[in-house]
Image: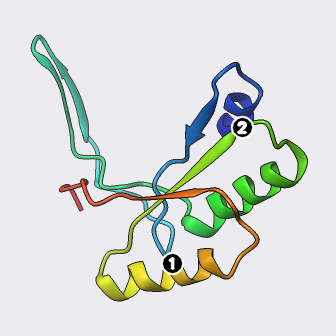
Amino acid sequence: EELLAIEQSQAGSFVTKTGTLEARQGNPEPRYVDTSLGSINSMGLPNKGYQYYLDIVTELERTKTHKHHFLSVVGMSPAETETILKAIHNSDYQGLVELNLSCPNV
């Protein structure tokens, strides 16, 4: 529902939450703290699995073509990453893929 709200906004494009091969709960709470100098997080990539986000952006491409969509994904191993990327390649998705290699908290 948040992605659909962004789709309807004036934003020119958007990037999905990073999806992994399987859904993840992320790290146990507390995992986010505000400080006077900024914030600290250790979210641990909570997500519904890449297929959930792939289905949404693929459907948005079919019904609303005025925005570019970025699908963010990562595997928990090189083999998982390859599995995800092959599945995206074999899907109807025509948008861009971001490979998120910058989450150290998993």
| Residue 18 drawn above or below residue 75 | above
- Residue 86 appears in which quarter of the rendering? bottom right
| Residue 13 drawn above or below residue 20 | above
- What's the residue at 30%, 47% (across, down)? 43
- Dot placed on the residue nearer the N-terminal end, 2 or 1: 2
Q: Position of residue 49 (x, y in %)?
A: 54, 66
- What's the residue at 75%, 59% (across, down)? 58
In this rendering, would 17 be left or right of 52? left
How many marks the image carries: the answer is: 2
Q: Which mark is residue 84?
A: 1
In the image, 51 versus 90, the foreground residue is 90
Q: Position of residue 44 (x, y in %)?
A: 30, 55
Q: Position of residue 29 (x, y in %)?
A: 28, 44
Regarding mark 1 in the picture, which secondary structure is present there? helix
Q: Quadrant of the N terminus?
A: top right
- Residue 38 appears in which quarter of the rendering? top left
In this rendering, would 55 be left or right of 23? right
Amino acid under disc 2: Lys
In the image, 12 versus 20, the foreground residue is 12
Q: Residue furthest left?
A: 37
Which residue is tagged 2? 67
Q: Residue furthest top?
A: 36
- Residue 4 appears in which quarter of the rendering? top right
In this rendering, would 24 be left or right of 78? right
Amino acid under disc 1: Ile
Q: Residues within 10 Å of mark 2 (few under 14, many from 20)?
A: some
In the image, 51 versus 42, the foreground residue is 51
Q: Position of residue 40 (x, y in %)?
A: 17, 32
